[in-house]
Amino acid sequence: MMRIVLKTLLAPDAYVWIAVVLLAVLTVALVFSWRRIHRRWLRWLYSIGLLGGWYFLLYGTFIGFTRLTVRQVELSFSDLPASFDGYRIVQFSDAHVGSYTGWREGLLQTAIDSIMAQKADMVVYTGDLQNKLPQEIRSHQQTLSQIRAKDGVYSVLGNHDYAEYVKCCPEEAEANCLETQQLEKSLGWTLLMNEHRVVRHGSDSIIIAGMENDGEGRFPALGDIPKTLDYPKIVRRPSIDDARPFIVMLEHDPTSWRRKILPECEAQLTLSGHTHGGQFAFWGFSPAQFKYSELGGVYREGDRVLHVTTGLGGVVPVRFGVTPEIVVITLRKK
């Protein structure tokens, strides 16, 4: 019984309804206490705050969450193999498909249609496919399995994909995690768990590597660079071999870029998600900037690049000032 109650309370729409009830109570309280508030400026401050709250909630739920941006990014690298000049990768992330219920179900199909319309060479997914449980993926299996690309669809796990947000025994948690992995593979995606694949065009090739989630604090920290790149076969130092491979690293959590990826390997391009861009931004500022130095967009360190997408969905289906997005990345040779 307790599990059913918790599941109901933590459903995506529950957060929205809690906010609606809270705002409704505050609105009623304002109406009945209007004459008792003797300071006019306090009345108007209270009223403007409530109107702002209603606007934020309604716009974020019914407009902000439903809009989709297809963002174009062009990235140049001096050591990109010539055959991959103009190579197009679609990146999407943080779908949190458990939030696409009821009237929102069609939004996921719209996003998939947009991904397929790009006719990219490769599609990559950078984690958090579910909110809490693999059953959410099963409900959208048919829709997600529509994603295809010439060179394949590659994915990694995010922190939500490890079933750590539901309190259960270790055996059940492990079973949930394995089911998530099996479901993701059943979509026709190549799930990379501290491993890599080689994509060849003629005599040229690039490496698509995928680490498990490598977060800080309460988030799973399971990324393993040596295992992912199969040391010493893949990673070669320029001083030993000038023809170093071009590596695209998929890692859900962007904090791993400075903490682990930059110091431990030579991946030229890292693709991440996780932050959602904070989901809420006011005049371009999000409070999440205090937590993440790489919140969304392109970041450079010498000739190394990190791209963080602000993602598609969210456990709480509300977005304000941070539009859901898919990203088309075009690789160029300098």
Image (tube, helix red, strand yellow):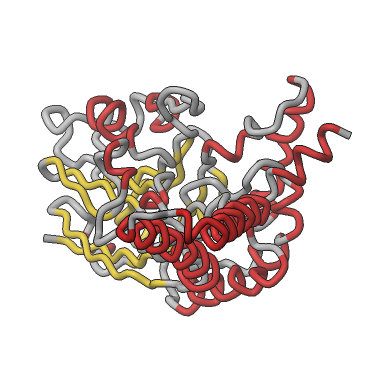
Identify the residue at horizontal 38%, vertical 55% (top origin).
38
- Relative placement, left or right, of 142 versus 202 is right
| Quadrant position of residue 25 | bottom right
* 199 in relation to 321, above or below: above
Q: Position of residue 210 (x, y in %)?
A: 45, 40
Q: Can see residue 80?
A: yes
Q: In this view of the protein, which residue sits in the foreground, 263 or 327?
A: 327
**Quadrant in the picture for residue 9:** top right
- Residue drawn at point x = 24 percent, y = 35 percent: 266
**Coordinates of residue 191 in the picture (x, y in percent):** 56, 45
User: On screen, 306 above or below 320?
Assistant: above
List x then y, in percent, for residue 238: 14, 33
> How many numbered marks are there?
0
Q: Residue at x 70, y 53 (%)?
A: 137
Q: Quadrant of the N terminus?
A: top right
Residue 245 versus residue 158: which sits nearer the camera? Answer: 158
Seen in the picture, residue 88 relative to 99 is either above or below; the reply is below
Residue at left offset 68%, top offset 72%: 103
Q: Is residue 22 left or right of residue 46?
A: right
**Quarter assignment of residue 107:** bottom right
Q: Does residue 96 appear anywhere in the picture?
A: no
Q: Residue furthest bottom?
A: 117
Q: Residue furthest top?
A: 170
Q: Residue furthest right?
A: 1
Q: Position of residue 128 (x, y in %)?
A: 54, 46
Please state if 257 lies on the left or on the right of 4 as rendered: left
Please state which of residues 226 and 181 is positioned toward the viewer in this rendering: 181
